Amino acid sequence: MRCPVRFPLLLSLLAAALLLAPACGGGEGDRSAGIIHRLLLAAGVDQAGALESFVGRLPDGLPVKPPQYPGADLIVSSRQPAPVGGTDAGLEGGAGAPRPLLYLIVLDTGDERAKVYAFYAEALDKDPWQIESAFSTEQLDTFEFTNVEDADIAGAVSISSGGEDARTSILISLQDAGAVQAGPPDGATPGEEPFELGESLPLPKGFPPDVPAYEGATITGSAFFREPGSESFLLIFLTPDSQGQVIEFYREEFQGRGWTVEEGAAVGLEDRIDFQDARQDIQGDVVADRSARARRFTEVRIEVRVNPARQPASDGATPEPTEAPPGETSSPR
């Protein structure tokens, strides 16, 4: 089981759209470029100094032109090496090595948000585009899409309105997974300072105490998403312990609570387990891999989906196993 929300992409887009909405209305290209720069840093893109900004035009090297809302002002665009997951060890090969590129395009229009939404709902459902998911909140609409003619191309469109001018801002994110690294990875230069851990972030509010924190870990990211009938959490942390040590810790913890633990469908060199309690009120997965930022650390991602109506364990307590109601099984979905 994997939680349905693709947290890193959705959260970075949500933050970008909400922050860019008041900044883009006045056509402040330099300010918008700075905001994109900070957002990429916050999203964990190493060496964000490699960001290239293009005020008032599309970015250089754009592999394919995504649909642009008719009559919208193109405020700024950018090109940046995309965030690299820990399994992408081959991306450290330097010049000529595969290295995904991330393109961002910021548009602004005086049309209402609903009209912009209707345009992209139709435009992204025509060849060569295909909508993979869509979600809306009071502040934001987001479409995730792929290119049916090129499996390396995928992206998202986020739409937000508001600000003093009540205009609608559009953020198009496009990733080219087949791009080739033109120079040193992430713009690194010989003699740069080694990676150092920062302060650990707090656990996200409401994170289920049934899933214990890993001792000595440094939390580098977290997320929370609520939808009807479930609440989803993401926790990302670094630890000097090995992948095997982390996975075994959580395996023993969950099995000690009477939960079902199974080997997950791992990708590359990562280790993964899927877990689920007897009533299917809490389920998720733990994925551990070497960190792309510092190979001496293990990066761990825990995704959890819970039933908000469940009876959670109190902090530090180990709940007694709960028997599934008649007719239900405890196997993972």
Image: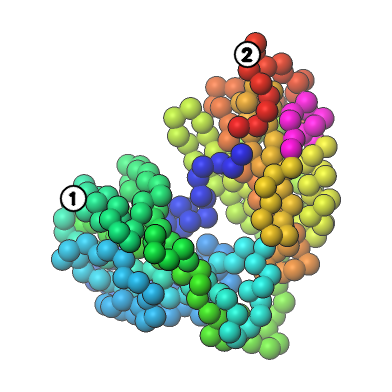
List x then y, in percent, for residue 228: 44, 30
Q: Residue at x 67, y 47 (%)?
A: 265
Q: At x 47% / y 66%, what residue is drawn?
A: 152
Task: Name the residue at 74% across, 28% down.
Answer: 259
Q: Position of residue 282 (x, y in %)?
A: 63, 30
Q: From the viewer's perspective, is the residue at label 1 or at label 2 nearer?
A: 2
Q: Earlier in the sequence, mark 1 or mark 2?
A: 1
Please tell me in which quadrant of the rendered image residue 256 appears.
top right
| Left or right placement of residue 167 versus residue 153 in this view | left
Considering the numbered disc 1 on the image, is that residue within a helix, a strand or a loop? helix
Q: Is residue 128 above or below residue 188?
A: above
Residue for badge 1: 115
Residue at the spot x=56%, y=75% of the render?
Answer: 99
**Is 33 a magenta residue?**
no
Tag 2: amino acid: Gly
Q: CA distance from mark 1 to mark 2?
A: 47 Å
Note whether residue 39 is visible. Answer: no
Of residues 325 and 74, the one nearer the viewer is 325
Q: Amino acid at mark 1?
A: Lys
Q: Which residue is mark 2?
A: 327
- Which quadrant does the N terminus fall into? top right
| Direction front: furthest residue | 149
Q: SS for tag 2?
A: loop
